[in-house]
């Protein structure tokens, strides 16, 4: 066939070079990619090369079982919250991630804390049980500590812990060390307190080639995380805060080291499988118990989140967010101290699971208190807005005028549903009413988020008279996943109809035109 | 460069054949055309072949002067209402087009009647003055009639018309004929009445090759239009209704003939320039005056519409639509007799121009009465709906629940504006209030029609929970043209901002995603 170059005039505005073969005109993908924001790549399939055209880059997870409030949270078992770039590190003081998304110095973001916990809860259910090895419990299981001259260790009964613990004192020596068997497990947990004013616990990680040693230290200080560089020898330091009282720590040393690397400008490329733990070193005078090495410790991390939420809930039931948030010009900024319906809801989802698993009533109490901002207007510090004074909406960002963010609203509904499902019947309080009202609003307003070829993230175009804020594909698929989840607990066909239509948009289908 | 065939996998769902040249992949337009509904054609530009890619097929008319209520109506001078397929013919009894859009037998559709009038009003302003030749006025200008034996003509004073007219009586003969000079003008007007029970006036059109003769007759009958075929000799017949009283007729004989052709199955391909008028034939006993041949007669056609509207307005001020209308399942059908805010508004635009041009107060009175349905709920036979019980909307289709059609609403606003602009100040009535309330709703709800890549025709997705009803490009450009018109009389930036964004969608731009 005859094949030639051909000039293509695009909307009479500019020209590109096309090809012609018979009556067929061929358009270069490099143009289409930008014009339509479509994705393509060359790939091998069954031995021959093909070009893979993708309308979207995201995935939908079709639920196979009805949603269970005590089960995995959506597809959060795929999340690795602490790995994200916008997570500065996991605080050794608080045991939860610190966000830098809207403030570079770092802050605790309740949504992120809850998602960290929910992802570990879900991983615990989806993954095989972890390998665990207790190295030292001060009693039956004792480790072979190397104690330099002048230093000492002893095992003694602790009346606060009601168990025998390891007491150590390094004096002025190089520290008390423990050589660890080479293994791939990098999640350490331990109970620790210091009797002296300062002291530290340092883990030494080694790369597979044994060419480098990476120390990660935990010290009695209020520093969040620091990276020190002494002539090319980097060390990473986390502050444990006040060390005088017993506290349990669970650390993923790979994460702890990577965050130090990033901080020191060495980048985040440090694969988990490349690392081995080599030894640890105790300094100062203190007590240690339940030193454990594991392949993972999702439940500890989950409870770290739950406990953080219990500790940081304020008297209005909210988890205040300590950073200013600017959503769009023309809208009142959110001043530090605002609540997010999404944060409240995700926290409730987490706390109800903590209550379900532990039976401890303070988790339930905290979840129930977490509903209070749902009944308070966002103009008065709550999270409740109304669409046209009629349809209540729980605001991820309780701006004035409201923003009506879809995904955050649905997360808040799931939180309410979790309370309804797992709280004792006589303690459910407003949860059922809030959930029902929210579902009613969702079903009514859902079509306003449908663009005919995708979805909008929020209704800012309506409240501020702006261009629609199109949801990028990962938010679009979040919308779908959320609707599919809700469709397993509410049979109203609007949920599946919209979800199915929105799925079809992801492969290029569009709503009909007239 | 090396050029090869390459398999393209589309969203993992099916395969098409692409081309590869170096690192560039070329996609066949025949695929893109269907996938994206984009338009393309090979064309010559400055002597070389190029491929013209068009995102949309419609055009925007940017207004160069502020909208003027007595001037041209939008770009309606480009409209040829009576040519449209859904127009069965222009009734000789009523002088206005008959629609078959929703009922094949034909009905008068006030929107179409008004648009017919507004297009001729606008053409009258945009086109050069017509050529006109009075052939017979019974007085100064007399034609050379061929009167067979037994028949007669005479010119006499008519006390009803207060002028001399031509009286004719064909008796049993072949009829009284008038040979017409060959010319391209095909718009005939005449005043006619019959003194006998039956009678007819027939025009004979000839094609340029003089190979065929096409008779078009006007008879004293109630038939709308008929096509007769007597062994290959076709004739087209229009009924003038009751013929006993003087009535003025203005006929575009090309249109009249084409509609007969379509009716008889001969298709609509009959170009205006191919036709000549050859002669006319009078039968029966009657009187004729002001027989005029013209290149066009827009103002007569305009007044035909205005008079039809005055005659057919009911006591509630509405122009009832006599056909059932089904909009979408789940919505109450409109039973015959419904009003359309668009029909009311377009009629008001027309009538106010008729009042402006003629000074005749009955046009003004009719326009003012036409506002009555705007204050009556569509649940009670009016056209007024509310978005969420808050924002009034004038419904093109006053369904329950409402449909919130955008273009019809804006046409109704323009009608109200025309009343405000051209009515004497002390007679404006509710027009200003209705206009202001409508503009307020429009500005608030306009963003809900924005899909980020086009516009929706209505809000059925919201009121019925369906897929969005995307506006095809011609409706999209109508939206834009209407907003640009309004922007010349209201400086609120939302109007121009939305219009400019919607214009950009027509060349492939999209609203940003997050
Ligand atoms: Ca112990
Ligand atoms: Ca006369």
Image: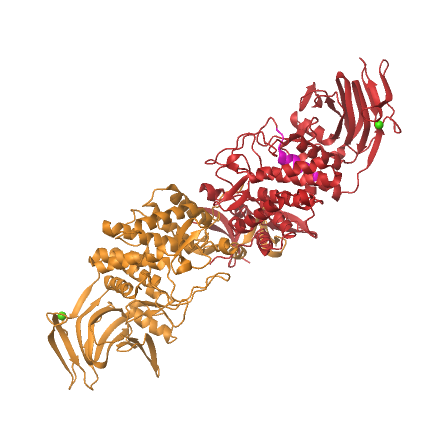
Chain colours: A orange, B red
Residue A442 position in % (x across, y down)? 40, 48
* Ligand 2 visible in quadrant: top right
Q: Is residue B449 visible?
A: yes
Q: Nearer the viewer, residue A282 or A44?
A: A282
In the picture, the quarter occupied by the C terminus of chain A is: top right
In this view, A169 is above or below B444: below
For image coordinates 66% across by 36% down, the residue present is B366
Please give the range of residues in magenta: B107-119
Quadrant of residue A44 in the image?
bottom left
Residue A316 lies in the magenta-colored region = no
In this view, B116 is above or below A281: above
Q: Nearer the viewer, residue B63 or A8?
A: B63
Residue B25 position in % (x across, y down)? 51, 55
For image coordinates 20% across by 63% down, the residue present is A131
Residue A175 position in % (x across, y down)? 20, 82
In this view, B373 is above or below A351: above
Q: Is residue A123 visible?
A: no
Residue B99 position in % (x across, y down)? 62, 31
* Main secondary-structure element of the magenta-colored stretch: helix
């Amino acid at each position: 066939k005859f094949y030639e170059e051909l000039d293509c005039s695009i909307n009479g505005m500019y020209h590109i070079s096309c090809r012609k073969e018979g009556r067929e005109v061929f358009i270069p993908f490099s143009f289409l990619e930008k014009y339509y924001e479509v994705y393509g790549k060359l790939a091998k399939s069954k031995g021959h090369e093909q070009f893979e055209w993708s309308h979207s880059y995201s995935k939908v997870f079709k639920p196979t079982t009805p949603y269970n409030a005590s089960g995995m949270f959506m597809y959060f078992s795929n999340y690795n919250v602490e790995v994200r770039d916008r997570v500065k590190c996991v605080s050794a003081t608080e045991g939860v991630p610190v966000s830098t998304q809207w403030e570079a110095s770092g802050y605790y973001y309740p949504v992120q804390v809850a998602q960290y916990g929910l992802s570990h809860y879900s991983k615990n259910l989806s993954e095989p049980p972890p390998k665990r090895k207790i190295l030292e419990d001060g009693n039956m299981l004792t480790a072979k500590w190397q104690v330099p001259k002048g230093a000492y260790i002893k095992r003694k009964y602790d009346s606060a812990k009601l168990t025998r613990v390891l007491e150590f004192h390094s004096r002025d020596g190089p520290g008390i060390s423990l050589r660890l068997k080479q293994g791939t497990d990098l999640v350490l947990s331990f109970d620790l307190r210091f009797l002296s004013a300062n002291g530290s616990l340092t883990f030494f990680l080694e790369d597979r080639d044994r060419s480098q040693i990476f120390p990660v230290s935990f010290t009695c200080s209020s520093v969040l995380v620091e990276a020190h560089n002494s002539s090319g020898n980097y060390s990473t330091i986390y502050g444990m805060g006040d060390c005088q009282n017993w506290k349990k720590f669970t650390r993923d040393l790979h994460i702890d080291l990577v965050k130090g690397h990033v901080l020191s400008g060495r980048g985040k490329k440090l694969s988990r499988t490349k690392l081995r733990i080599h030894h640890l070193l105790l300094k100062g005078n203190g007590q240690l118990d339940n030193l454990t090495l594991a392949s993972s410790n999702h439940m500890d991390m989950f409870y770290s989140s739950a406990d953080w939420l219990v500790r940081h809930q304020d008297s209005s039931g909210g988890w205040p967010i300590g950073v200013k948030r600017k959503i769009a010009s023309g809208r009142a900024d959110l001043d530090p101290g605002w609540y997010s319906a999404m944060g409240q809801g995700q926290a409730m989802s987490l706390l109800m699971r903590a209550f379900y698993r532990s039976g401890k009533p303070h988790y339930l109490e905290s979840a129930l208190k977490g509903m209070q901002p749902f009944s308070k207007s966002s103009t008065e510090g709550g999270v409740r807005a109304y669409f046209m004074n009629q349809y209540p909406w729980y605001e991820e960002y309780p701006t004035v005028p409201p923003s009506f963010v879809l995904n955050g609203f649905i997360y808040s509904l799931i939180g309410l549903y979790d309370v309804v499902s797992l709280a004792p019947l006589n303690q459910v309080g407003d949860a059922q009413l809030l959930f029902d009202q929210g579902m009613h609003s969702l079903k009514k307003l859902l079509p306003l988020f449908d663009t005919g070829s995708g979805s909008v993230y929020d209704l800012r175009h309506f409240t501020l008279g702006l261009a629609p804020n199109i949801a990028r594909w990962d938010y679009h698929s979040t919308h779908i996943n959320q609707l599919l989840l809700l469709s397993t607990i509410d049979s109203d066909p609007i949920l599946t109809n919209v979800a199915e239509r929105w799925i079809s948009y992801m492969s290029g289908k569009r709503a009909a035109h007239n």
